[in-house]
Amino acid sequence: MIDAREFVRADSERLIEEWGRIALIPAPEGGEGVRATLIAELASASGAPDVQLDAVGNVVTVIEGDDPDGEHLTFLATMDDLGTVAAHRAVSDVLRRDGDRLVGPATETTSSDASALSILRFVLAGPKPWRRMTIAWVLGEETGLTGVRALVDERGADLGSVIDLMGGVGTVSWNAIGFAGLEIDFTAEPRHTLYGGISEVPDAIARFIAALDADPFPPHGPPFDADPLTARRINGIHAGTVFNHSPAIGTVGVDLRCTDAALLTEIEVATRAAAEAAAAAAGVQVRFRDGERQPAITLAGGREHRLVRALATAIRDVGRDPILRAWSSSNVNVVYAAGLEGVVHDGTHRGNGRGTPEEWTDIPGVLDGVAADCRMLQLLAADPLA
């Protein structure tokens, strides 16, 4: 059996060199093609069989294992950048090593791409005690999970158990946090300031915000290690365009999130009721529109699930302390919605400055993360039903 940490030490310079090459290519929504082509070339150079660019632009390779009765496993890495990150990379050639840091725009996201390439080489170098391994670099993680949706639609159950790589080491995440976004419109007849009285629409908005702040439900969310995790926050307010008239309409955007589907529904019902009460008190009309929506899905077994326990053990085996977090908002949400099992490996302290010209990512954390992912494979193979 290959020692995972020794393998990563031997592979580290190649990993960092490939990581830098990938990070130098901006990959905004709809512009991931050049980065995808490079990743496909690097995967082929690493020995990956039949590397494909699928219909939407994901890079996919499938490695057959040695156990015809074994399980199917999949690693996912994210190819695309946030728009702000891609914009900085498009006008910058900054990429340098500064001690333990790789500095430059896009280094955080692309750490997952380089990690997956190193895991690919680990998989090809040793025994393959599983039925099939899929490694996919997917686009659209930052912009609607479009890449993983296409991958799941095409391959479904063949993906098996999924490990979503975010780059770095330390945080083990599961469950898909649900979204129940609301756009709330308060409406009234506009009136000139000289007619006096209160401007009804802003009054309704103020009453609504005050009601949410007074609610014992934590409006800004509890600590991230809560289970279930719940969060409610007003992220958008707009009312009025004319200096001397009360507005005819005002809109409040509310971001509701929870890992428990029933509790998410309860929170949404309470939020709508608060808006209706505020509208009645202010003498205005109210209507609701759905904002961002995503179902909340729980991983059966939670922290006792074999993927969660295997990854947490693997992180300890490489000398790090795992942080268990019962929520995620990433590619794994689509995996869960398809009825598959999955877990997310994220860097607890991956870096800083994301979306700035001086973004940086912790190199030792990325290397330890790869070692932990490789060790996780060994633990799953040794006891697949654990």
Image (cartoon, helix red, strand yellow):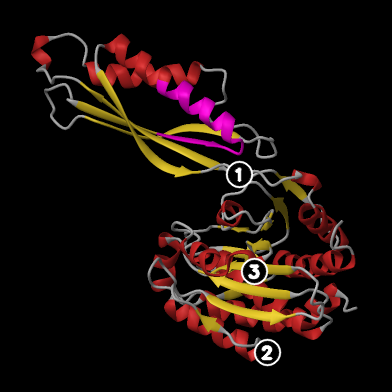
Quadrant where the image shows the C terminus: bottom right
Dominant secondary structure, magenta: helix
* Contact between labelled residues 1 and 3, with CB atoms less than 8 Å apart: no
Residue 83: percent from left, percent from top: 40, 61
Q: Which mark is residue 47?
A: 2
Q: Residue at x 65, y 86 (%)?
A: 48
Residue 195 to residue 288: above or below: above
Q: Which residues are magenta?
A: 254-272
Q: Residue at x 41, y 60 (%)?
A: 84
Q: Label 1: which residue? A: 297
Residue 53: percent from left, percent from top: 50, 80
Sequence-wise, the earlier of marks 1 and 2 is: 2
> Quick check: 281 left or right of 325?
left
Residue 258 on the magenta segment: yes
Q: Nearer the viewer, mark 3 or mark 1?
A: 3
Sequence-wise, the earlier of marks 3 and 2 is: 2
SS label for mark 3: helix
The amino acid at mark 2 is Gly
Front residue (pair 3, 308):
308
